[in-house]
Image (tube, rainbow, N blue to C red):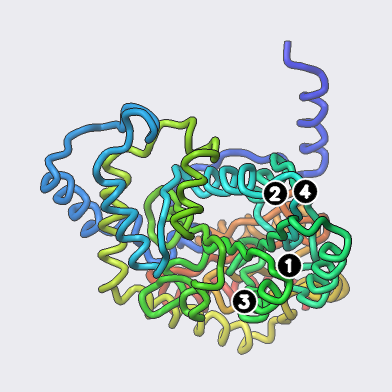
């Protein structure tokens, strides 16, 4: 018999119209996937990965064990060297996923007596890693650097001299699509002798001349203690890496449990990452994506959609006005439509009209901050963008 407490939690989700269910693939116009550059479907990457495996005389289907046992096949060194060089980092360490990377980093690096200051909108994987840490953790208001400054001052004044402070943010936030002022964040970190960690999951392939991410585009890579990059979004494949110093890499190999106690990625995954980075250097998809982002924003303005500034003020304004887009320069654009039932209903109408736009429900986002999440891609046409926004305009009350 299924445990009563667990069944009760499921019933609560159903009552709140928030029960998650697995969907199926469809032929709708894609405004929901993280495949920003279309690399997941690119045959040149598939073929290049296959040819690379043949060149390396690798026919293994699996890694056979963890990297500390039998799984450290030769593609790891090749790919990690490429990542370090491409991202101008002293070292790179590949993890099986972004979730594994964040869990592994935050559960092992901050020590007892240390302080973690994290943006309140930080990803769930980072929160889970922080919860596994022995350090004390405090959130600061979303992209509010004055609030962060005050917390840094408070923690420096009351913490032991040997306490380390870790400041954690994302270069592009997955549920809002907005970005912090990374230059000022870097200055604050230096001022308070803190270590800055930036999750670049939704910036790789989107920002920078070569798609190298927002940190590197701003020439801040030497000021960052650790960058977490993932390959399952803009790169269209699988896995993640932590960029940092050689000492950080050595530490993670010895103490990061999600790295130590898991079977390594198979050779084909590493070959695909290798091929995707080669493609990233030469592809025109990056400029096509940027053109679509600009066009999407211009259509929002043309159709007189409300646009709210990113940060803590966006939600109260949105609730008062019922709906509106959060300002974003990334591939993620969110229209706040409070209420699970409301946002699910409008998402369903868009899907019935041929557009795959997904609702983001509470508790994934806080109650009354539910939204439609539009993910833009290099392969979306201007006609598709215009039509999805005009269709949305027919279903929302201005």
Does 131 sit above or below residue 38?
A: above
Label 4 to label 3, Cα distance in Å?
A: 26 Å
Residues tagged 1 and 3 counted as in contact (Cβ below 8 A): no
Q: Position of residue 309 (x, y in %)?
A: 74, 80
Q: Position of residue 126 (x, y in %)?
A: 65, 50
* Left or right: 166 in relation to 251: right
Q: Quadrant of the N terminus?
A: top right
Label 1 to label 3, Cα distance in Å?
A: 25 Å
Residue identifier under label 4: 113
The circle drawn on residue 84 is none
| Earlier residue among tags 4 and 3 | 4
Label 2 to label 3, Cα distance in Å?
A: 20 Å
Residue identifier under label 2: 127
Label 1 to label 2, Cα distance in Å?
A: 23 Å
| In this rendering, the label closer to the viewer, 1 or 2 | 2
Label 1 to label 4, Cα distance in Å?
A: 39 Å
Residue identifier under label 3: 182
Residue identifier under label 1: 336
* Left or right: 204 in relation to 69: right
| Earlier residue among tags 2 and 4 | 4
């Amino acid at each position: 018999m299924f445990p009563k407490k667990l069944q009760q939690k499921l019933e609560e989700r159903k009552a709140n119209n928030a029960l998650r269910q697995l969907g199926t693939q469809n032929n709708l116009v894609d405004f929901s996937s993280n495949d920003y550059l279309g690399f997941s479907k690119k045959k040149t990457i598939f073929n290049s990965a296959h040819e690379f495996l043949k060149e390396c005389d690798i026919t293994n289907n699996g890694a056979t064990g963890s990297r500390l046992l039998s799984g450290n096949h030769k593609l790891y060194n090749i790919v990690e060297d490429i990542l370090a060089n491409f991202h101008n980092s002293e070292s790179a360490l590949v993890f099986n996923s972004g979730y594994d990377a964040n869990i592994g980093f935050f559960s092992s690096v901050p020590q007892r007596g240390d302080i973690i200051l994290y943006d309140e909108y930080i990803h769930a994987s980072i929160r889970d890693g922080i919860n596994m840490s022995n350090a004390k953790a405090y959130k600061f208001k979303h992209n509010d650097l004055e609030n962060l400054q005050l917390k840094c001052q408070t923690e420096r004044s009351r913490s032991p001299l040997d306490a380390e402070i870790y400041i954690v943010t994302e270069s592009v936030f997955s549920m809002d699509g907005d970005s912090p002022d990374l230059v000022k964040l870097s200055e604050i970190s230096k001022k308070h002798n803190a270590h800055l960690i930036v999750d670049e999951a939704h910036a790789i392939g989107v920002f920078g001349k070569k798609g190298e991410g927002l940190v590197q585009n701003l020439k801040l890579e030497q000021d960052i203690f650790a960058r977490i990059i993932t390959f399952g979004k803009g790169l269209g494949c699988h896995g993640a890496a932590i960029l940092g110093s050689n000492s950080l890499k050595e530490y993670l190999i010895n103490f990061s449990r999600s790295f130590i106690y898991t079977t390594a990625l198979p050779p084909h995954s590493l070959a695909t990452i290798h091929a995707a980075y080669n493609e990233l250097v030469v592809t025109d998809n990056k400029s096509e994506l940027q053109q679509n982002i600009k066009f999407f924003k211009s259509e929002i303005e043309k159709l007189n959609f409300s646009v709210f500034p990113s940060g803590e003020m966006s939600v109260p304004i949105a609730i008062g006005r019922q709906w509106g887009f959060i300002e974003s320069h990334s591939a993620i654009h969110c229209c706040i439509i409070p209420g699970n039932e409301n946002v699910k209903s409008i998402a369903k109408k868009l899907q019935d009209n041929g557009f795959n736009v997904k609702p983001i429900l509470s508790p994934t986002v806080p109650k009354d901050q539910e939204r439609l999440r539009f993910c833009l891609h290099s392969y979306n046409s201007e006609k598709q963008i215009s039509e999805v926004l005009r269709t949305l305009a027919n279903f929302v009350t201005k």
